[in-house]
């Protein structure tokens, strides 16, 4: 009986598919959050540059999104 169970591979493809799918979802989630932070930092810097009264005036550090 034990030999029959060890050679039964039904469902293995589904398990492998679910594991790979979980790995892909986790990688995409991490990449998405990092991209969101980078874009937020970029736009915040641009807003501070644009909001200055003149090109040589100091940037307003209180501007936050």
Image: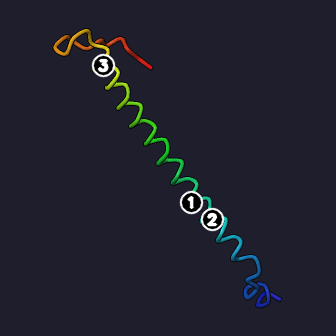
Find residue 20 and report its horizontal and vertical position in percent: 59, 66
Residue on which the image places disc 3:
50
Give the distance between the C-alpha atoms of the residues marked 3 and 1, in whole angstroms. Answer: 41 Å
Q: Residue at x 61, y 59 (%)?
A: 22
The local secondary structure at tag 2 comes to helix
Q: Quadrant of residue 12?
A: bottom right
In the picture, the quarter occupied by the N terminus is bottom right
In the picture of the structure, the residue carrying the numbered disc 1 is: 23
Q: Are marks 1 and 2 in contact (CB under 8 Å)?
A: yes
Quarter location, residue 57: top left
- Mark 2 highlights which residue? 19
Counting residues from the start of the chain, the first of labels 3 and 1 encountered is 1
Q: What residue is drawn where x is 48% and y is 41%?
A: 33
Q: Residue furthest right?
A: 1
Q: CA distance from mark 1 to mark 2?
A: 6 Å
Kindly report the distance in space between the C-alpha atoms of the residues bearing marks 2 and 3.
Answer: 47 Å
Q: Earlier in the sequence, mark 2 or mark 3?
A: 2
Quadrant position of residue 52: top left
**Residue 5 coordinates in the image, percent (x, y):** 78, 84
Residue contact at pointers 2 and 3, CB within 8 angstroms:
no
């Amino acid at each position: 009986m034990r030999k029959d169970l060890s050679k039964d591979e039904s469902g293995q493809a589904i398990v492998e598919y679910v594991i790979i799918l979980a790995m892909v979802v986790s990688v995409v989630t991490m990449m998405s959050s990092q991209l969101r932070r980078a874009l937020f930092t970029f736009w915040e810097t641009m807003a501070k540059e644009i909001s200055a009264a003149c090109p040589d005036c100091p940037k307003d550090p209180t501007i936050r999104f």
